[in-house]
Image (cartoon, helix red, strand yellow):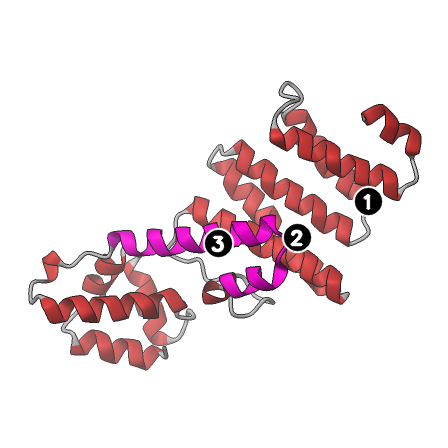
Amino acid sequence: MRPNELKSKRIALGLSQQDLSELLEICPILISEYEMGLTPIPKLIELAFDTIENRLKKTSIKSEITLKPFFRVKIKKLIKEANKAEFARDIKTLRVVLEPIWLDIKKRPEIAGYDDEIKAEILRLCGFYLTFYGRANNLKYCQETAKDFLFKSVEMFESLDLLERSAEAKITLAFCYWNSGEVSETDLVLNTIEKDFSGEMSHPLFIRVQINRLLIFYWNKENKRAERLI
Protein backbone atom coordinates (compact mmCIF):
# COMPACT_ATOMS: atom_id res chain seq x y z
CA MET A 1 0.00 0.00 0.00
CA ARG A 2 1.34 3.41 -1.01
CA PRO A 3 1.08 6.51 1.26
CA ASN A 4 -1.45 8.30 -0.98
CA GLU A 5 -3.55 5.12 -1.21
CA LEU A 6 -3.75 4.87 2.58
CA LYS A 7 -4.78 8.53 2.85
CA SER A 8 -7.40 8.22 0.09
CA LYS A 9 -8.96 5.13 1.68
CA ARG A 10 -9.02 6.75 5.11
CA ILE A 11 -10.74 9.89 3.78
CA ALA A 12 -13.19 7.83 1.69
CA LEU A 13 -14.23 5.98 4.85
CA GLY A 14 -14.75 9.26 6.69
CA LEU A 15 -12.03 8.55 9.23
CA SER A 16 -9.69 11.12 10.71
CA GLN A 17 -6.07 10.18 11.46
CA GLN A 18 -7.09 10.02 15.13
CA ASP A 19 -10.02 7.69 14.31
CA LEU A 20 -7.76 5.36 12.34
CA SER A 21 -5.04 5.31 15.01
CA GLU A 22 -7.64 4.36 17.64
CA LEU A 23 -9.01 1.56 15.47
CA LEU A 24 -5.50 0.23 14.87
CA GLU A 25 -4.48 0.93 18.48
CA ILE A 26 -1.26 2.67 17.45
CA CYS A 27 0.19 6.15 17.98
CA PRO A 28 -1.63 8.82 15.89
CA ILE A 29 1.65 10.28 14.65
CA LEU A 30 2.38 6.98 12.89
CA ILE A 31 -0.65 7.47 10.64
CA SER A 32 0.70 10.85 9.63
CA GLU A 33 4.15 9.38 8.97
CA TYR A 34 2.64 6.56 6.87
CA GLU A 35 0.64 9.02 4.75
CA MET A 36 3.63 11.34 4.27
CA GLY A 37 5.86 8.43 3.24
CA LEU A 38 8.19 8.99 6.19
CA THR A 39 7.67 5.50 7.60
CA PRO A 40 7.14 2.31 5.53
CA ILE A 41 3.60 0.96 5.78
CA PRO A 42 3.72 -2.56 7.28
CA LYS A 43 1.88 -5.39 5.53
CA LEU A 44 -0.23 -5.83 8.66
CA ILE A 45 -1.60 -2.31 8.19
CA GLU A 46 -2.94 -3.35 4.77
CA LEU A 47 -4.57 -6.44 6.28
CA ALA A 48 -6.05 -4.38 9.10
CA PHE A 49 -7.39 -1.82 6.63
CA ASP A 50 -9.19 -4.57 4.70
CA THR A 51 -10.77 -5.63 7.99
CA ILE A 52 -11.82 -2.04 8.76
CA GLU A 53 -13.44 -1.68 5.34
CA ASN A 54 -15.34 -4.94 5.72
CA ARG A 55 -16.60 -4.02 9.18
CA LEU A 56 -17.57 -0.49 8.18
CA LYS A 57 -19.75 -1.99 5.44
CA LYS A 58 -21.69 -3.82 8.14
CA THR A 59 -22.14 -0.91 10.56
CA SER A 60 -22.36 2.87 10.34
CA ILE A 61 -21.36 3.37 13.99
CA LYS A 62 -17.60 3.78 14.34
CA SER A 63 -17.66 3.15 18.09
CA GLU A 64 -18.91 -0.38 17.44
CA ILE A 65 -15.80 -1.20 15.41
CA THR A 66 -12.81 -2.48 17.33
CA LEU A 67 -9.54 -3.88 16.07
CA LYS A 68 -7.80 -3.86 19.46
CA PRO A 69 -7.04 -7.58 19.39
CA PHE A 70 -6.18 -7.55 15.67
CA PHE A 71 -2.49 -6.70 15.88
CA ARG A 72 -1.92 -8.74 19.04
CA VAL A 73 -3.42 -11.85 17.45
CA LYS A 74 -1.64 -11.39 14.12
CA ILE A 75 1.77 -10.57 15.56
CA LYS A 76 1.57 -13.29 18.22
CA LYS A 77 0.68 -15.82 15.55
CA LEU A 78 3.62 -14.60 13.46
CA ILE A 79 5.99 -14.92 16.43
CA LYS A 80 4.68 -18.39 17.24
CA GLU A 81 5.30 -19.56 13.67
CA ALA A 82 8.73 -17.93 13.69
CA ASN A 83 9.62 -19.69 16.95
CA LYS A 84 8.67 -23.03 15.38
CA ALA A 85 10.90 -22.35 12.37
CA GLU A 86 13.72 -21.26 14.69
CA PHE A 87 13.44 -24.43 16.76
CA ALA A 88 13.56 -26.54 13.59
CA ARG A 89 16.48 -24.44 12.26
CA ASP A 90 14.34 -23.91 9.14
CA ILE A 91 15.85 -20.64 7.97
CA LYS A 92 13.88 -20.48 4.69
CA THR A 93 10.55 -20.79 6.48
CA LEU A 94 11.66 -18.28 9.11
CA ARG A 95 12.34 -15.72 6.39
CA VAL A 96 8.91 -16.26 4.84
CA VAL A 97 7.21 -15.90 8.24
CA LEU A 98 9.04 -12.66 9.07
CA GLU A 99 8.63 -11.09 5.64
CA PRO A 100 5.34 -9.21 6.36
CA ILE A 101 7.16 -7.04 8.92
CA TRP A 102 10.69 -7.27 7.50
CA LEU A 103 10.99 -6.78 3.75
CA ASP A 104 14.62 -5.61 3.63
CA ILE A 105 17.05 -7.68 5.72
CA LYS A 106 19.57 -4.83 5.65
CA LYS A 107 17.15 -2.67 7.65
CA ARG A 108 15.35 -3.10 10.95
CA PRO A 109 11.94 -4.79 10.87
CA GLU A 110 8.81 -2.63 10.89
CA ILE A 111 7.96 -2.80 14.60
CA ALA A 112 6.66 0.69 15.34
CA GLY A 113 3.41 0.56 17.31
CA TYR A 114 4.07 -2.75 19.06
CA ASP A 115 4.88 -3.04 22.75
CA ASP A 116 8.51 -3.40 23.80
CA GLU A 117 8.33 -7.12 24.58
CA ILE A 118 7.09 -7.87 21.07
CA LYS A 119 9.69 -5.53 19.55
CA ALA A 120 12.47 -7.27 21.49
CA GLU A 121 11.37 -10.75 20.40
CA ILE A 122 11.05 -9.75 16.74
CA LEU A 123 14.54 -8.25 16.83
CA ARG A 124 15.85 -11.46 18.40
CA LEU A 125 14.22 -13.61 15.72
CA CYS A 126 15.53 -11.37 12.92
CA GLY A 127 19.00 -11.55 14.52
CA PHE A 128 18.74 -15.34 14.62
CA TYR A 129 17.83 -15.46 10.94
CA LEU A 130 20.62 -13.10 9.93
CA THR A 131 23.40 -14.92 11.76
CA PHE A 132 22.60 -18.32 10.22
CA TYR A 133 21.70 -16.94 6.80
CA GLY A 134 24.93 -14.94 6.83
CA ARG A 135 26.97 -17.95 7.82
CA ALA A 136 25.43 -20.14 5.10
CA ASN A 137 26.09 -17.50 2.44
CA ASN A 138 29.34 -16.06 3.81
CA LEU A 139 27.83 -12.57 4.21
CA LYS A 140 29.74 -10.63 6.84
CA TYR A 141 27.29 -7.72 6.93
CA CYS A 142 24.60 -10.11 8.17
CA GLN A 143 26.59 -10.82 11.34
CA GLU A 144 27.09 -7.12 12.05
CA THR A 145 23.41 -6.33 11.49
CA ALA A 146 22.45 -9.32 13.64
CA LYS A 147 24.61 -8.04 16.50
CA ASP A 148 22.90 -4.66 16.30
CA PHE A 149 19.45 -6.30 16.48
CA LEU A 150 20.46 -8.63 19.30
CA PHE A 151 22.11 -6.00 21.49
CA LYS A 152 18.92 -3.95 21.23
CA SER A 153 16.80 -7.01 22.00
CA VAL A 154 18.84 -7.78 25.14
CA GLU A 155 18.59 -4.15 26.23
CA MET A 156 14.81 -4.08 25.81
CA PHE A 157 14.21 -7.39 27.60
CA GLU A 158 16.40 -6.27 30.51
CA SER A 159 14.57 -2.94 30.75
CA LEU A 160 11.35 -4.96 31.17
CA ASP A 161 13.06 -7.16 33.79
CA LEU A 162 12.49 -10.23 31.60
CA LEU A 163 15.78 -11.91 32.44
CA GLU A 164 14.97 -15.29 30.87
CA ARG A 165 14.01 -13.62 27.60
CA SER A 166 17.17 -11.53 27.79
CA ALA A 167 19.19 -14.72 28.27
CA GLU A 168 17.56 -16.24 25.18
CA ALA A 169 18.60 -13.17 23.18
CA LYS A 170 22.13 -13.49 24.59
CA ILE A 171 22.29 -17.13 23.48
CA THR A 172 21.34 -15.98 19.97
CA LEU A 173 24.04 -13.31 20.26
CA ALA A 174 26.52 -16.02 21.25
CA PHE A 175 25.56 -17.90 18.06
CA CYS A 176 26.24 -14.69 16.15
CA TYR A 177 29.75 -14.35 17.58
CA TRP A 178 30.31 -18.06 16.95
CA ASN A 179 29.24 -17.74 13.33
CA SER A 180 31.59 -14.76 12.99
CA GLY A 181 34.49 -16.89 14.22
CA GLU A 182 34.77 -14.82 17.41
CA VAL A 183 35.10 -17.73 19.82
CA SER A 184 36.38 -15.74 22.83
CA GLU A 185 33.45 -13.29 22.54
CA THR A 186 31.08 -16.26 22.38
CA ASP A 187 32.58 -17.52 25.62
CA LEU A 188 32.18 -14.12 27.30
CA VAL A 189 28.48 -13.93 26.41
CA LEU A 190 27.90 -17.46 27.69
CA ASN A 191 29.69 -16.52 30.92
CA THR A 192 27.15 -13.80 31.65
CA ILE A 193 24.23 -16.20 31.16
CA GLU A 194 25.91 -18.91 33.22
CA LYS A 195 26.45 -16.45 36.07
CA ASP A 196 22.79 -15.39 36.06
CA PHE A 197 21.61 -19.01 36.28
CA SER A 198 24.44 -20.52 38.33
CA GLY A 199 22.02 -21.36 41.14
CA GLU A 200 19.65 -23.20 38.79
CA MET A 201 21.77 -25.84 37.12
CA SER A 202 18.70 -27.72 35.89
CA HIS A 203 17.28 -24.61 34.20
CA PRO A 204 16.93 -25.12 30.40
CA LEU A 205 18.92 -21.95 29.71
CA PHE A 206 21.81 -23.10 31.92
CA ILE A 207 21.81 -26.45 30.11
CA ARG A 208 21.83 -24.71 26.72
CA VAL A 209 24.88 -22.73 27.81
CA GLN A 210 26.69 -25.96 28.70
CA ILE A 211 25.82 -27.49 25.32
CA ASN A 212 27.24 -24.42 23.60
CA ARG A 213 30.36 -24.64 25.75
CA LEU A 214 30.87 -28.21 24.59
CA LEU A 215 30.79 -26.95 21.01
CA ILE A 216 33.45 -24.38 21.84
CA PHE A 217 35.66 -26.97 23.54
CA TYR A 218 35.24 -29.27 20.56
CA TRP A 219 36.11 -26.45 18.16
CA ASN A 220 39.24 -25.58 20.18
CA LYS A 221 40.16 -29.27 20.58
CA GLU A 222 40.01 -28.89 24.39
CA ASN A 223 38.95 -32.45 25.05
CA LYS A 224 39.91 -32.46 28.73
CA ARG A 225 37.70 -29.45 29.48
CA ALA A 226 34.86 -31.06 27.56
CA GLU A 227 35.22 -34.26 29.62
CA ARG A 228 35.12 -32.28 32.89
CA LEU A 229 31.99 -30.49 31.79
CA ILE A 230 30.27 -33.78 30.94
Q: Amino acid at mark 2?
A: Lys
**Residue 87 counted in the magenta span:** yes
Q: Is residue 46 magenta?
A: no
Q: Quadrant of residue 155?
A: top right
**Among the two numbered marks 3 and 2 on one chain, the one whose residue lies closer to the N terminus:** 3
Question: Given contact means CB atoms under 8 Å apart, are the residues at marks 3 and 1 in contact?
Answer: no
Image-based side of 57 in relation to 226, left or right: left
Single out the residue that lies furthest toward the left.
Answer: 60
**Residue at the disc numbered 2:** 147
Q: In this orientation, does residue 211 appear?
A: yes
Q: Nearer the viewer, mark 3 or mark 2?
A: 3
Magenta: main secondary structure = helix
Of tags 3 and 1, the one toward the viewer is: 3
User: Taking 184 as reference, is 120 left or right?
Assistant: left
Of residues 67 and 82, the one drawn nearer to the viewer in this rendering: 82
Quadrant in which the C terminus appears: top right
Q: Find residue 124 and report its horizontal and vertical position in percent.
A: 56, 50
Residue on which the image places disc 1: 183
Query: Which one is in front, 136 or 170?
Result: 136
Residue for point 29% across, 65% down: 48
In the rendered image, residue 167, in percent from the top left (x then y), is placed at 60, 36
Q: Which residues are magenta?
A: 68-97
Q: Which structural element holds mark 3?
A: helix
Secondary structure under the numbered disc 1 in the rendered image: helix
Residue at position x 74%, y 32% in the image? 210
- Residue corresponding to mark 3: 81
What distance separates the C-alpha of mark 3 from that of mark 2?
Answer: 23 Å
- Residues at marks 3 and 1, CA–CA distance in whole angstroms: 30 Å
